[in-house]
Amino acid sequence: MNDETSKSGGEPIVRLDKVNKYFGSLHVLKDIDLEVTPGEVVVIIGASGSGKSTLIRCINGLEEFQQGALEVDGNPLLPHGKATKTLQKIRTEVGMVFQQFNLFPHLSVLDNVTLAPMKVRGLSREDAIKIAERLLDRVGIGDQAQKYPSQLSGGQQQRVALARALAMEPRLMLFDEPTSALDPEMIGEVLDAMRELANEGMTMLVVTHEMGFAREVADRVIFIHKGEIAEEGPPETIFDSPQAEPTRQFLSRVLKH
């Protein structure tokens, strides 16, 4: 774990200033201002289609934005996807876990985890295997290293995806609804691995519908409504005494289920 991570503050590792994103005429993100400090766990909640996933996909350049400024660990991302030498650097420092597992089906679990450290970071296979074995143990599936993705449950596959992202030793982890494609009985095992990661001090931005996880793990909860940050604050404030009417309406719906 990067020993620079600390919730004591310091320079933000993520900084967005008046970021706007359009899909054609659809205004998806509206003047987003956001800073995330090292070691902070920020959970983003909101209705489907509110812009949550688009926001975190902008942070590692998977989506272009049209206006504003966006910086990751001091490296700027430019509007309209204009070429910048820092994009590759950002992607080596930012790990991402998606809704779908995106594992290579023809590779074993071990080879899925070792591929990027060898190809991108230039590690030897021996060193990459040591890292992969440690991380697979850490997420609770060290005994599955020689299996193929099709031989694993959804929860196990998502934990392989988490180990694969961690193998690049990222300074920041992004999660885009990592449990939404899982059967209910498998959600807990993925959330447990994420809890452990948060407890170890990893900087995390998490889009999720798991409100219990948000309440328990987040340092800060951000509620996005129609492309805007409608409200943000510590989880006890957002969940127990939300100030914005859209937040109250959203929580009254989701907390009933």
Image (tube, helix red, strand yellow):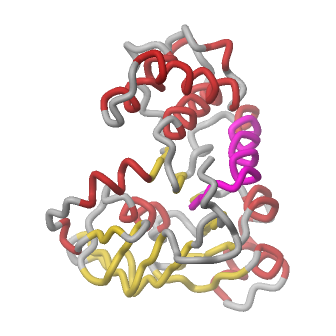
Q: On screen, 124 above or below 98? A: above
Nearer to us in this view, 96 or 137: 137
Nearer to us in this view, 22 or 12: 12
What percent of the width, then of the height, locates residue 55? 43, 67
Q: Residue at x 51, y 17 (%)?
A: 110
- Check the picture and name the quadrant holding the C terminus: bottom right
User: In which quarter of the view is residue 250 placed?
Assistant: bottom right
Nearer to us in this view, 144 or 84: 84
Q: Is residue 195 magenta?
A: yes
Image-based side of 191 in relation to 34, left or right: right
Image-based side of 5 in relation to 57, left or right: right
Magenta portion: prevailing SS class: helix
Q: Residue at x 20, y 59 (%)?
A: 85
User: Which segment is the magenta one?
Assistant: 188-205
What percent of the width, then of the height, locates residue 238? 75, 79
Q: Is residue 198 magenta?
A: yes
Q: Residue at x 69, y 47 (%)?
A: 197
What percent of the width, then of the height, locates residue 102? 42, 33
Image-based side of 129 in relation to 257, left or right: left
What percent of the width, then of the height, locates residue 150? 50, 15
Q: Residue at x 18, y 71 (%)?
A: 80
Q: On screen, 161 above or below 242? A: above
User: In which quarter of the view is residue 111 placed?
Assistant: top left
| Residue lying furthest top | 146
Tally of numbered tags: 0
| Residue lying furthest left | 83
User: In which quarter of the view is residue 117 placed?
Assistant: top left
